[in-house]
Image: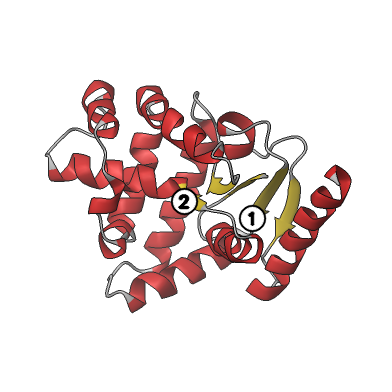
């Protein structure tokens, strides 16, 4: 079974994906981590984040395991990820890696922004996870503050709005819900309630396939 979980930053999709991975014993890939790692690697190399050829070269040689979560969870890494993710050459360089992960014999869970529409349009279950931007900003700000980041809530809210706009309007693989995706709005949900909704969707798909 392939489960595609798409949605906006800090909507809860990553947490839902990890919980479902445990519940259904499926391997999980956070595809956003690939773009964060690409952005951080490019910055470390002093590359121009708008140079598609140079960034695609970085992506083609990427070793995600070499990066720590602390490196990849900063506001700066998130902003870099959003910038490199709009480059078609970069998305193409990372696409095969994601598809190969999805089609392993056990199946898999992938979360990102274009899993159900581009990476795995054939997914057995597609979820779209979202929440209003103010709630998402507060969640992300709390994470960053705990990690020692000094970005303000207002700055982060502005960054999220900018990132949403850029991701929704990029020409290649824009962030959009698949037509057959099940919406989970986490604005007023606890994480347990959101996971319950996601689990119900997976169980329903399982019952249909026997």
Query: Residue 126, how many percent across, how many down?
Result: 70, 44
Rendered image: mark on residue 130 = 1
165 and 44: which is toward the camera: 44
Are the two marked residues, 2 and 1, in contact with CB atoms closer than 8 angstroms? Answer: no
Rendered image: mark on residue 30 = 2
Query: Residue 76, how many percent across, how many down?
Result: 28, 54
- The image's colour scheme reads secondary structure
Query: Residue 40, how many percent across, how many down?
Result: 24, 47
Rendered image: mark on residue 42 = none
Looking at the rendered image, the quarter that the N terminus falls into is top right
Residue at image location 34% in from the left, 35% down from the top: 84
Query: Residue 178, how many percent across, how many down?
Result: 70, 36
Residue 190 seen in this snapshot: no
Residue furthest out toward the front:
105
Instruction: Relative to 13, say whether 116 is above or below.
Output: above
Crowd rating for badge 2 (residues with CA inside 10 Å; few <14, some 14–19, many 20+) = some
Quarter of the figure with residue 75: bottom left
135 and 194: which is toward the camera: 194
Instruction: Relative to 20, say whether 43 is above or below.
Output: above
């Amino acid at each position: 079974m392939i489960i595609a979980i798409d949605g906006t930053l800090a909507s809860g999709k990553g947490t839902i994906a990890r919980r479902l991975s445990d519940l259904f014993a499926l391997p999980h890939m956070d595809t956003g981590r690939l773009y964060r790692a690409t952005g951080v690697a490019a910055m470390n190399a002093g590359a121009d984040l708008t140079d598609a050829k140079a960034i695609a070269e970085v992506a083609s040689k990427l070793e995600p395991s070499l990066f720590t979560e602390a490196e990849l969870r900063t506001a700066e890494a998130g902003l870099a990820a959003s910038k490199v993710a709009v480059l078609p050459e970069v998305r193409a360089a990372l696409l095969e890696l994601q598809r190969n992960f999805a089609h392993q014999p056990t199946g898999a869970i992938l979360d990102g922004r274009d899993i159900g529409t581009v990476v795995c349009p054939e997914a057995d279950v597609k979820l779209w996870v979202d929440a209003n931007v103010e709630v998402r900003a507060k969640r992300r700000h709390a994470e960053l503050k705990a990690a020692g980041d000094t970005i303000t809530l207002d700055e982060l809210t502005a960054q999220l709005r900018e990132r949403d706009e850029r991701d929704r309007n990029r020409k290649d693989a824009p962030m959009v819900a698949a037509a057959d995706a099940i919406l989970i709005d986490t604005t007023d949900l606890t994480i347990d309630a959101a996971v319950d909704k996601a689990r119900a969707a997976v169980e329903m798909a399982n019952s249909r396939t026997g």
